[in-house]
């Protein structure tokens, strides 16, 4: 199988996002059953209307688990949880070119649901969200190098 990625565009799986009603009980469960530990957070993000933390089993883990809980009554996560559709719901990829990645997603029939915005949990690096034709939700995070190249 050959890649149809535009030249120079790269993606790296960063985390699996899990919607939860509250961070602490979910983190406790992941710790007691699987040995996960909180490695960063909690971070309150008023733009995304969520509070999050990140967990890994060891410093060698390449992919984190991001627990996401509602921060406000109108949080998109609260609406999802109220429908009974919590749990793992998105994959996040870091990319070296956020604008090119979003254009590539649109060229492949995806719908951009949130344009680039700075995120507290990523030190101000911008994130964006899109749905695929199959209604899969993906988050993109610009890499540190991309943030630095833009002078952000």
Image (tube, rainbow, N blue to C red):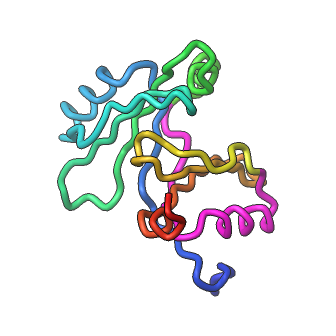
The quadrant in which residue 40 appears is: top left
Q: Is residue 82 above or below residue 133?
A: above
Viewer-nearest residue: 137 or 101: 101
> Residue at point 78% right, 62% down?
106
Q: Is residue 68 above or below residue 75?
A: below
- The reply, left or right, for residue 109 in relation to residue 73 is right
Is 106 covered by the magenta stretch? Answer: yes
Count of numbered circles on the image = 0
Q: Is residue 146 above or below residue 91?
A: below
> Residue at point 59% right, 45% down?
117
Q: Position of residue 61 (x, y in %)?
A: 26, 58
Q: Which range of residues does the magenta coloring cover?
A: 87-111
Viewer-nearest residue: 86 or 138: 138
Q: Is residue 20 above or below residue 39?
A: above
The quadrant in which residue 23 appears is: top left
Q: Position of residue 114 (x, y in %)?
A: 68, 44
> Residue at point 49% right, 43% down?
119
> Residue at point 72% right, 69% down?
104
Residue closest to the far top: 73
Q: Position of residue 39 (x, y in %)?
A: 23, 43
- The reply, left or right, for residue 146 in relation to residue 62 is right
The quadrant in which residue 27 appears is: top left
Is 6 covered by the magenta stretch? Answer: no
Q: Position of residue 62 (x, y in %)?
A: 31, 61
């Amino acid at each position: 199988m050959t890649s149809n990625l535009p030249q120079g565009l790269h993606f790296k799986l960063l985390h699996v996002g899990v919607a939860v009603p509250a961070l602490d009980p979910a983190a406790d469960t992941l710790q007691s059953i699987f040995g996960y530990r909180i490695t960063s957070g909690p971070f309150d993000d008023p733009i995304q209307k969520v509070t999050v933390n990140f967990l890994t089993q060891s410093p060698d883990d390449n992919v984190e688990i991001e627990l996401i809980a509602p921060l406000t009554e109108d949080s998109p996560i609260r609406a999802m949880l109220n429908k009974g559709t919590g749990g793992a719901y998105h994959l996040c990829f870091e990319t070296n070119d956020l604008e090119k990645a979003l254009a590539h997603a649109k060229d492949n029939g995806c719908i951009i649901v949130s344009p680039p915005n700075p995120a507290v949990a990523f030190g101000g690096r911008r994130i964006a969200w899109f749905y695929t034709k199959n209604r899969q939700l993906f988050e993109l995070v610009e890499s540190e190098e991309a943030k630095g190249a833009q002078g952000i």
